[in-house]
Image: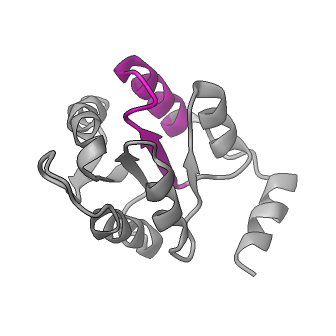
Amino acid sequence: MKIAIASDHAGFKYKGMLIPFLTNFGHGVVDFGTYSDETVDYPDYIRPAAEAVSRGDFDRGIVLGGSGNGEAIVANRIHGIRCTLCWNTESARLSRSHNDSNILALGERMLTEKDVKEIVEIWLNTPFDGGRHLRRIEKIDL
């Protein structure tokens, strides 16, 4: 799977941890920045990653910040993006099975590294259920 990944300064550490985690599972990962923990404006990095997913250049995206809220808001401004902020494995599972989430937002200040790895693994491996959920997804971008 091709994955776009981006963060602001508050998500930089976990982004750095996730890149080798993802590549070890055979995923192709492109880092859209930021490239240090110096303070930055998260839309400068999240928007290009979300646009790349929206265009179909990537299968999925992962965006990280302190809480993940701002990152989810930015990503969801892009047509065709369904970014979900997940805080545990069940929210990750449902975001895929019911919402066909194509970008995952995570908050570094809210989760342990172990939690993040478990959430990402569930999110990447859970298929979309389709059925009644597809009808609802189709109504999002009317």
Q: Is residue 65 above or below residue 111?
A: below
The furthest residue to the bottom? 142
Residue 136 in the magenta stretch? The answer is no
Q: Position of residue 28 (x, y in %)?
A: 26, 47
Q: Residue at coordinates 45% horizontally, 33% vertically from top-left?
A: 120
**Viewed as shown, does residue 139 lie left or right of 44?**
right
Q: Residue at coordinates 56% horizontally, 38% vertically from top-left?
A: 86
Q: Is residue 49 above or below residue 60?
A: below
**Viewed as shown, does residue 132 lie left or right of 108?**
right
Please tell me in which quadrant of the rendered image residue 93 appears. top right
Please tell me in which quadrant of the rendered image residue 132 appears. bottom right
Judge whether residue 99 can be spotted in this image: yes
Q: Is residue 49 above or below residue 91?
A: below
Which span is picked out in magenta? 102-124
Please tell me in which quadrant of the rendered image residue 142 appears. bottom right
Q: Position of residue 106 (x, y in %)?
A: 45, 41
- Figure label count: 0
Along the line of sight, which residue is nearer the eye, 30 or 116?
116
Along the line of sight, which residue is nearer the eye, 132 or 82?
82
The furthest residue to the front? 39
Q: Position of residue 124 (x, y in %)?
A: 49, 38
Judge whether residue 131 can be spotted in this image: no
Q: Residue at coordinates 53% horizontally, 55% vertically from top-left?
A: 102
The furthest residue to the right? 132
- Name the colour scheme: one colour
**Viewed as shown, does residue 99 lie left or right of 33?**
right
Q: Position of residue 5 (x, y in %)?
A: 31, 52
Q: Residue at coordinates 81% horizontally, 54% vertically from top-left?
A: 133
